[in-house]
Image: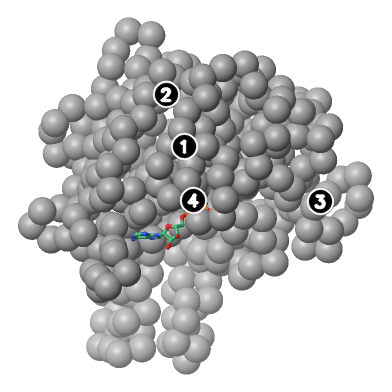
Amino acid sequence: MKTRLHTLSLTEFRGYERLDVDLEGRSLYLFGANGAGKTNFLEAISVLNPGRGLRNASVGDLGRRLPHETKGRAWGVSAILKTEDEEVRLGTGSDPRNLDKRAVRIDQQTVVAGRLLDHLRLVWLTPAQDRIFLEARAERLRFFDRLVFAADPHHASTVAAYEKALRERLKLLTQGPADAVWLDALEERLANAGVGMIVARRLALEALQAEIESHQGAFPKADLGLTGEEQSGAVAVYDHRALNGWLRDGFARARARDSAAGRSLFGPHRTDLSVFHRDKDRQAADCSTGEQKALVLNMILAQGARLSRVKMAPNPVVLLDEVAAHLDPIRRGALFDETDHLGLQTLFTGTDENLFDGLKGRALGVRVEGGQWTEFRN
Ligand SMILES: Nc1ncnc2c1ncn2[C@@H]1O[C@H](COP(=O)(O)OP(=O)(O)OP(=O)(O)O)[C@@H](O)[C@H]1O
């Protein structure tokens, strides 16, 4: 589905009191000084997907707050998306009954946040994600899980169900009573969700690697892998029954150890994403900052390309925050060509207008200053 973002309206969102934007389905570059409101705008789009958006912010922090105010106001973001033959209106914002929760609407009907993925799939890259190779394993896994669930929306709810059961099991093990029947039931739930997680991640990894191989872009190739106990187990990943049994045995065996450690030391939440820079013959963590940025960007572009080929799902919209400034002119040009060639509606930000010279005529340009927009249609 060739989904395109057409209009966006922000109300009391971060620094924006009110903003109405008509993108007409085009790509966009936003430029302006630090603090002008560029990332805030991308963040507003990012909350049109499930989760906490590209800054991982809580609902209460997203509302506009004047310097003397201690609490953010009630906020809202809405968008009109168009495909070849239909138009849909997505909306989200503070729930009027509880401003710390958010409500989601599709065509005026209140729905669960996961339904947003039926209409809009986002891929984003922010400066914080450049550091994923240096972050703790859990951060890297969260980054990878986002890539998985953009293509497979069930993955998000499977991970949530798994994590809930994992917390309950740990509570039983550490605070008791460690009722064996209840532990068995929780571990069965963990094993069921765990199989789903392992298989979804493996399939996503294979698809992403295949996409990277088929790409002849200007960005370095990554060899991706998943490491961790459960991945290197002797069980074939597609033998779901055996995998399930292996997980249940593993959880049962880990009870005493987890109880003593106060942590869950076994299971697919312990997986790590390994990324290897093929040309440099080095792990990503040992590469230069620029090399790491290029590797992540290539993964994000591969993800965009992969999602754009899925016939029954919406075409992804790509948010690239401050990416252009870190690329040399040749790579920057290659990035613009590549997003264009893939037909991806892409929203770029940067401090200087001239970073985007290569996009003139291909995207809408906007100067942002103190939350005010000046458009340059070209
Ligand atoms: N809840 C809020 N209410 C009002 N203003 C906010 C709120 N949250 C953040 N801001 C303000 O928004 C501005 C940051 O905007 P944003 O992060 O979009 O800037 P930017 O243009 O991306 O800048 P940079 O180039 O530095 O990344 C800051 O001035 C910040 O104080």
**Residue in view at x 57 percent, y 50 percent:** 33
Q: Nearer the viewer, residue 247 or 88?
A: 88
Farthest residue to the right: give it. Answer: 280
* Distance CA(mark 4)–CA(mark 2): 19 Å
**Residue 156 seen in render:** no
Q: Quadrant of the C terminus?
A: top right
**Residue in view at x 43 percent, y 50 percent:** 370
Q: Residue 122 bears which disc, if any?
A: 1
N-term-proximal mark, 1 vs 3:
1
Q: Residue 23 bears which disc, if any?
A: 2
**Residues at discs 1 and 3 in contact (Cβ within 8 Å):** no
Q: Is mark 4 within 8 Å of ligand 1?
A: yes
Q: Position of residue 49 (x, y in %)?
A: 36, 42
Residue at numbered disc 4:
36
Q: Position of residue 214 (x, y in %)?
A: 76, 25
Residue type pointed to by label 1: Leu
N-term-proximal mark, 2 vs 3:
2
* Distance CA(mark 1)–CA(mark 3): 24 Å
Residue at numbered disc 3:
291
N-term-proximal mark, 2 vs 1:
2
* Distance CA(mark 3)–CA(mark 4): 28 Å
Residue type pointed to by label 3: Glu
